[in-house]
Amino acid sequence: MIQRIQTVYLLITEILVGLLYLLPFAEISAKNNVAYRADMQGIYLEGTPNSDLIQRHWPIFLCWVAIMILMFAAIFLYKNRKLQLRLLNISLLTLLCFGGLILFELRSGAQRLSGQFSLTVYMVIPIFAILLIFLAVKAIKRDDLLIKSIDRIR
């Protein structure tokens, strides 16, 4: 059913991961005291009205789109719990790849700009998303066990 607790977990996860599109996830400070901002689209020069794009983040963006599609599909597959669990496992792996891609892109961007990167507080969002997916998987398995026990009673 769509009003189950796992749907709430998945909806919160969808919203949190969707917010990552709007929020910067790192700042890069170069050696010449120039600040750069890294978000979903790429690395931008900070403080200019027309922020100059330094490096594009296509792999991060595509991974984000895959996560959003998987989570959206998992919300509406409540009748097929087996497929829902499979999609959630795939989205867990995709979230882990997403975090790794972010770190890789930031490291390469910082090396390219001869600077250091520092993660913002918004980088805890993928960690919260992973925890919420684990809670949703646990709730789906609990529902599956409940339905199997009811079928056994019949």
Image (cartoon, rainbow, N blue to C red):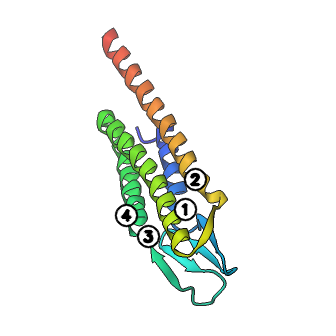
Q: Earlier in the sequence, mark 4 or mark 1?
A: 1
Q: In the rendered structure, are the residues bearing label 4 and label 3 in contact, judged by CB atoms less than 8 Å apart? A: no
Q: CA distance from mark 2 to mark 4?
A: 17 Å
The mark lying in front, picked from 3 and 2, is: 3
Q: CA distance from mark 4 to mark 1?
A: 15 Å
The mark lying in front, picked from 1 and 3, is: 3
Residue 50 image position (x, y, % from top left): 57, 90
* Residue 19, disc: 1
**Horizontal placement of 73 versus 135: left or right?**
left
Crowd band around label 4 with a 10 angstrom C-alpha radius: few (<14), some (14–19), many (20+): few
Q: CA distance from mark 1 to mark 3?
A: 17 Å
Q: In the rendered structure, are the residues bearing label 2 and label 1 in contact, judged by CB atoms less than 8 Å apart? A: yes
> What residue is at 40 percent from the left and 54 percent from the top?
67
* Residue 62, disc: 4
The mark lying in front, picked from 2 and 1, is: 2
> What residue is at 32 percent from the left and 11 percent from the top?
152
* Residue 117, disc: none
Q: Amino acid at mark 1?
A: Leu
Q: Earlier in the sequence, mark 2 or mark 1?
A: 1
> What residue is at 52 percent from the left and 47 percent from the top?
129
Identify whether 79 is placed above or below 101. above
Q: Earlier in the sequence, mark 2 or mark 4?
A: 4
Q: Amino acid at mark 2?
A: Ile
Q: Earlier in the sequence, mark 1 or mark 3?
A: 1
Identify the residue position indicated by label 3 in the image: 57
* Residue 125, disc: 2
Residue 108 image position (x, y, % from top left): 49, 66
